[in-house]
Amino acid sequence: MRIAIFSDVHGNKEALTSIIEDINKENIDEIICLGDSIGIGPNPSECMDMIIDNNVKMVLGNHELYFLKGTDIDARLGEDEKEHQKWIKEQITNRQREYIEKCPLTLEREYDDKKVLFEHFPVEHNSKDQYPFYDLEIAKDGSIKEIIESLDYDLVFIGHEHKNFCIDNELYDIGSVGCTNDNITKYGILDTDTFIVQQKRIEYDRDKFESVLLSYKYPCRDVIAQWFFGLEIGKDIQKTK
């Protein structure tokens, strides 16, 4: 089998469109999204429709959990971020809600006695906190390696951190489809016969995305544009380094 894996679309319809178009050119048997398809970008509803219409299996990211359970599950969210999440809720249709409600927190697969785990980010199963994921710091201080090694899986795929990285050919952070500073987006392909992971980088219509982003005046847009898309919104749009 060949499995296409992507994560963190974050409402970037143009990037997701390029991903789906490229996947359709490949000999793909299954498509898995590692969550955070909504939140941050301007087109959460359109992205959810694309995921549903293309028979993508999705696990829940933190932004889907904010949608389902509310923002109080994450004490780190400020008032502006909560307002942003309210706007997201207003964009999601009943059809999309029903799909999200059926998504699991993790997906497990077994191929020829090799076990594979798909999740948005490592989950603290023993935690009593409603927010289930470990802090992002584990990816920065290296402790994520010990956590993954303690799990009984041959391969683990995650997203959330928005950066590609691989540890010992066992853990793959697939990176973010939508949160980019340029016109390059990315996804991965797992060949379950060889257990080789191909990481693909493709172009998307960045100019159209920027135009769409500027046309929406939603909560936190200007801060989001700079932090997650490398844009400063003023009289003229400027790309930051």
Image (cartoon, grey):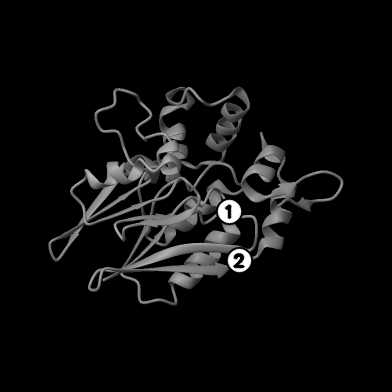
Say which mark, if any, is on residue 126: none
* 190 vs 51, nearest the viewer: 190
Cα distance between the residues tagged 1 and 2: 10 Å
Tag count: 2
Residue at the spot x=72%, y=49% of the render?
231
Direction from residue 117 to residue 10 in the image, left or right: right
Q: Are marks 1 and 2 in contact (CB under 8 Å)?
A: yes
In the rendered image of this protein, does residue 2 appear above or below residue 72?
Answer: below
What residue is shown with label 2? Answer: 204
| Label 1: how many Cα within 10 Å (few below 14, some 14–19, many 20+) | many
- Position of residue 94 relative to residue 183, above or below, is above
Q: Residue at x 26, y 68 (%)?
A: 195
**Residue 1: x and y, percent?**
26, 71
The residue type indicated by label 1 comes to Asn
Residue type marked 2: Tyr
* 39 or 96, nearer to the observer: 39
Q: Position of residue 177 (x, y in %)?
A: 52, 57
Mark 1 residue element:
loop
* Residue shown at 46% from the left, 32% from the top: 66
> SS at mark 2?
loop
The image shows residue 126 at horizontal and vertical percentages of 24, 28
Asked whether 79 or 148 is in front, the reply is: 148
The quarter holding residue 54 reads: bottom left
Tell which of 143 and 109 is nearer to you.
Answer: 143
What numbered label is drawn on residue 12?
1
The answer to which quarter of the image holds residue 123 is top left
